[in-house]
Image: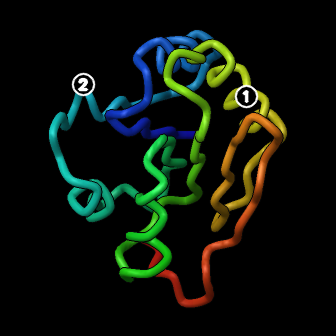
Amino acid sequence: MRLIADQNVHRRVVKRLREAGYEVEHIQETMPGRSDEDLLRRADIGEAIFITGDKGFGDWTFNKGLPRPRAILLSRLPQPEWATTADRLIACLERGIAPGQMVTITKSGERIKPFPPGANNG
């Protein structure tokens, strides 16, 4: 399973995911400063689960017709809680994430929203 972590994902979260055995590309390392639109236009975006803390990211996929990742994990947990964020992301990944879903992780739980019909897939 290939993961792409947005530049707003804490580097310690990325490190913890890698230590757990996940292949994670951190945009902060490979494409710093790039726009969400640039990221979604990547040829390989449809093969990856995208991890972000940017709630506006879903808008590009849901409403603007840009290519979409395989799935989106949106963390709404505060940045200082990077260890909790990493643990929650790993738990989600271990349970499995169906293609075409956006999973929002909050302090009180998780919300799953399917991509709208006709959403563009990479």
Q: Is residue 65 above or below residue 3?
A: below
Identify the residue under disc 2. Answer: 29
- Give the residue furthest to the left: 33
Name the kind of residue labelled 1 in the image: Arg
Q: As rendered, which of 109 and 41 lies closer to the eye?
A: 109
Q: Quadrant of residue 99?
A: bottom right
Q: Callout 2: 10 Å neighbours few (<14), some, many (20+)?
A: few
Identify the residue under disc 1. Answer: 88
Please give left or right for residue 99 compared with residue 8 in the image. Answer: right
Foreground disc of the pair 2, 1: 1
Give x and y (percent) for residue 110.
78, 47
Which quadrant holds the C terminus? bottom left
Which quadrant holds the N terminus? top right
Please give left or right for residue 93 compared with residue 6 in the image. Answer: right
Looking at marks 2 and 1 on the same chain, the residue that comes earlier in the sequence is marked by 2
Q: For the point 38% across and 72% down, which residue is it?
A: 67
Q: For the point 29% across and 61% down, which residue is it?
A: 43
In this figure, what is the number of numbered marks?
A: 2
Colour scheme: rainbow
Give x and y (percent) for residue 29.
24, 25
Q: For the point 71% across and 67% down, which residue is it?
A: 113
Q: Secondary structure at mark 1?
A: helix
